[in-house]
Image (tube, rainbow, N blue to C red):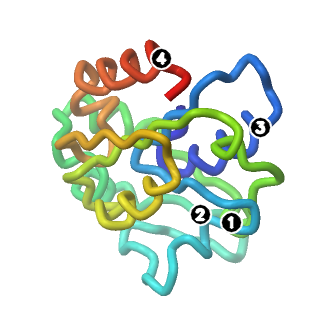
Amino acid sequence: MGHSYGGMVITDAAAGHENVEHLVYITSVMPELDETLAGLGGSREPGPWMDPHPEDGTMGLKAELAPDAFMQDCDEAAVAGALERLTRQPLAAFGQSPRAVAWREKPSTYVVCAEDLATPPEAQREYARRAGKVVEIPTDHHPMLSRPELLARVLAEAAATPDE
């Protein structure tokens, strides 16, 4: 399962591994071999919640803007827990493309989060065209926090039919 930037990770990491039977992308990029996260953003400006620090080579999120952009359906406890776990990541990650493309060799499901304010549903649907199966759910960017029971059903269904 790859959520958000995690789509870059599973696309690369799962390639060539027999023990990975099915990929699930959740409001995520679904890159091709030569695509980067920065390039997949197209000409869109970075969201106002983005907090790049070129001086130390990292990217983060502005904690005060993250709840409205990513977690508008979450309760206060879920938001507080998520904000406690916010970390910065290297800016270099935004310019890296996958070394291999697992979705070309493995079945995949794309979960479009139709109420996501951070990754527009239109962009998700475009990425999802590469998936074998597409499921759309009425959630924000973090369905594992806002609607875990719904996401669990989607994941269970994907696991029950790994060859689709």
How many other residues sit within 10 Å of disc 1, few (<14), some (14-19) or many (≥20)?
some
The picture places residue 39, in percent across and down from the top left corner, at 61, 75
Amino acid of disc 2? Met
List x then y, in percent, for residue 120. Answer: 31, 64
Disc sitting over residue 15 in the figure: 3
Closer to the camera: disc 3 or disc 2?
A: 3
What x and y, as percent, mark residue 157?
37, 19
> Which of the two residues, 63 or 127, is positioned nearer the viewer here?
127
In-front residue for pair 117/113 = 113
Q: Helix, strand or loop at disc 1? A: helix
Could you tell which of marks 3 and 1 lies nearer the N-terminus? 3
Dot label at residue 159: 4
Residue type at mark 4 is: Ala
Residues at marks 1 and 2 touching, judged by CB atoms closer than 8 Å: yes
Question: Which of pointers 1 and 2 lies earlier in the amino acid sequence?
Answer: 2
Which residue matches tag 2? 59
Relative height, residue 77 to residue 116 (above, below) = above
